[in-house]
Image: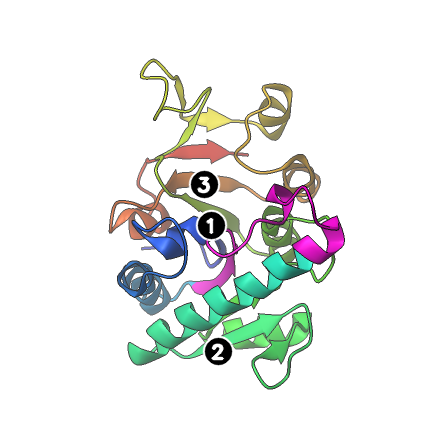
Amino acid sequence: MPNFKRIVLKLSGEAMAGDKSQGIDMEAIRTIAKQVKHINELGVETSVVVGGGNFWRGRDSSNMDRATSDYMGMLGTVMNALAIQDALEQMGVDTRVQTAIEMREVAEPYIRRRAIRHLEKNRVVIFSAGIGNPYFSTDTTAALRAAEISADVILVAKKGVDAIYDSDPNINKDAKKFDKLSYLEIINKNLKIMDTTAISLCMENQIPLRVFGIDDASSMIDVVLGKDIGTKVE
């Protein structure tokens, strides 16, 4: 039986790119969609927040106005959301994309009560375009949407790493893995698993996090079923 009734799944844009450095890898998206479908069939009300780093990272542009750069990144998240929606619907999963920037020909505008109603009807809801404002990351979007829809947990799926470490395990073979952390420990140790705004929102609203690797094709399902993998933050 699943451990959670309602979840927010936070996916990075890099997860959409698979083994590529940029763009969309449909095979990687189908792998993610299969796990989301399985979780949905377990009766878990599932929402997704997706990043856009496979197309554009607003903070990486030093020669562009920050707000303009962030808006470009938001549009990248919409493309990723539509790709996930298409993969899920090809598998027979009823899905809705909601955007924080209004584009009615493409997706629904974000409306909290409508999102909750979709979840209650066992539809997967994909939140895109961040919160609709520059200077806020999709990490913060995940924390905010989780608070708004009263999610039980945020599942933070990371590419290339299977938990929170004190340094990058891909660079430092002696990196220490954390099985459990508090929000304050993440902030005090400067562990960059999510930005400080997002962690503060989770702490204030008592939203637990589960940080795990997405490279394993069943890890998402294992976390939902309560298996002890990754790092717990609460």
Identity, as a three-letter code, of the amino acid under mark 1: Ser
* Residue 113, image quadrant: bottom right
Between circles 1 and 3, the one closer to the viewer is 1
Image: magenta residue range: 45-69
Which image quarter is the C terminus in?
A: top right
**Residue annotated with mark 3:** 210
In the picture shown, does residue 27 fall above or below 159?
A: below
Location of mark 2 (residue): 121
Q: Earlier in the sequence, mark 1 or mark 3?
A: 1
Give the labeled residue for mark 1.
12
> Which amino acid, by three-letter code, is at mark 2?
Lys
- Marks 3 and 2, how far apart at CA: 25 Å
Look at the image and say whether residue 55 sits in the magenta stretch. Answer: yes
Residue at screen point 67% across, 70% down: 112
Image quadrant where residue 34 sits:
bottom left
Circles 3, 2 touching at the beta carbon (< 8 Å): no
Image x and y of residue 6, in percent: 49, 59
Tag 3 secondary structure: strand
Residue 209 vs residue 157, the one in the foreground: 157
Q: How many marks?
A: 3
Query: Judging from the image, what secondary structure is the residue with disc 2 in?
Result: loop
Image-based side of 60 in relation to 80, left or right: right
